[in-house]
Image (tube, rainbow, N blue to C red):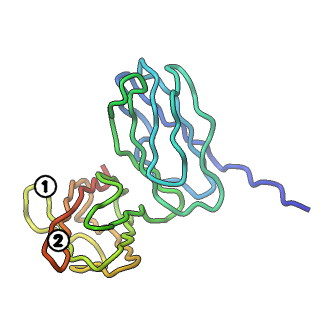
Amino acid sequence: MAANPKAFATQYQIQIALGGTVSSNGNIKITNSDSISFKNNAGFPVNIIFTAVYGPINGLPNGGTQAPNGGPGLNTTINFSIYNANTGLKVSGPYYVEFGQGPLVVSIAGLNTNPDPIAVPALGQLQFNCDAAYNIVWKFANGLNANVWTPTKTQLPAGSTTLTALSGATLQVLTYIITDASHTRGGGTVNVGS
C-alpha cells in the first residue's frame, strides 16, 4: 500500500513585479516541506530558469500563477532567473531558495563553472563538484582577498567539497578565481545573502 503524500507546510508565492524583477520571496530560506509558486505581474510573459531540481517554466503569462514546486525531503539551495519570454533576454536574477539546509551545487569542469553567477543565503553553503583539483582564491568586490568560507580552502580536490559562508560574506558580492596546474584561469561570482 502506497503512503499518502505529505502535505506542504507552507506555500511561498514568489511575486514577479512590473519589469520582471522579483518583489517578494525572491531570496528565501524555507523548510524542506514547504513549496513555492510564482505570480507573474511583469507586464509580459516570462520564462523562469532554475539551476537544479526543476525544469524551466516557459511562457508564464502576465497575470498567471504557476503551480507549486518543492516538497518534502529537499535539502538543497537552488537559483532561478527571470527571462522575458518575448525576447529571450534575462531581466533579473539569480535569486535563491534554500529548502531545508543544503548547498547550492556548482560544477567545475575544464575551468568552466556552472552555474555562474550564483546567489546563496547568508551563512549558506556551496558545494563544488570538480573534475580535477583546482586552486581557488576569493576576492571582495573591491579586489581585497576574502577569507569568508569555512573550512578555509585554497585548493578544491577532484570530487565534492562543501563550503559554508561566514558572517563576513553576508551582503557581499564575491568573486573566485580558479587555476589548474597549467595556471589557466577560470572563476565565477557569488552574491551572499542579498
Give 35 or 80, whichever is nearer the viewer: 80
Residue 141: which disc?
1
The residue at 53%/57% (across/down) is 99
Q: Residues within 10 Å of mark 1 (few under 14, many from 20)?
A: few
* Label 2 residue SS: strand
Q: Which residue is mark 2?
A: 137
Residue 4: which disc?
none
Q: Residues within 10 Å of mark 2 (few under 14, many from 20)?
A: some
Considering only vertical position in the picture, is 60 above or below 125? above
The percent coordinates of residue 95 (x first, y second) are: 38, 45
Residue type indicated by callout 1: Ala
The residue at 32%/81% (across/down) is 157
68 sits to left or right of 177: right
Residue at far left of view: 143
Q: CA distance from mark 2 to mark 1?
A: 13 Å
The percent coordinates of residue 123 (x first, y second) are: 35, 64
Considering only vertical position in the picture, is 146 above or below 171? below
The residue at 33%/34% (across/down) is 90
* Label 1 residue SS: loop
The percent coordinates of residue 37 (x first, y second) are: 56, 38
Considering only vertical position in the picture, is 34 above or below 137? above
Give 82 or 3, whichever is nearer the viewer: 82
Residue type indicated by callout 2: Val
67 sits to left or right of 178: right
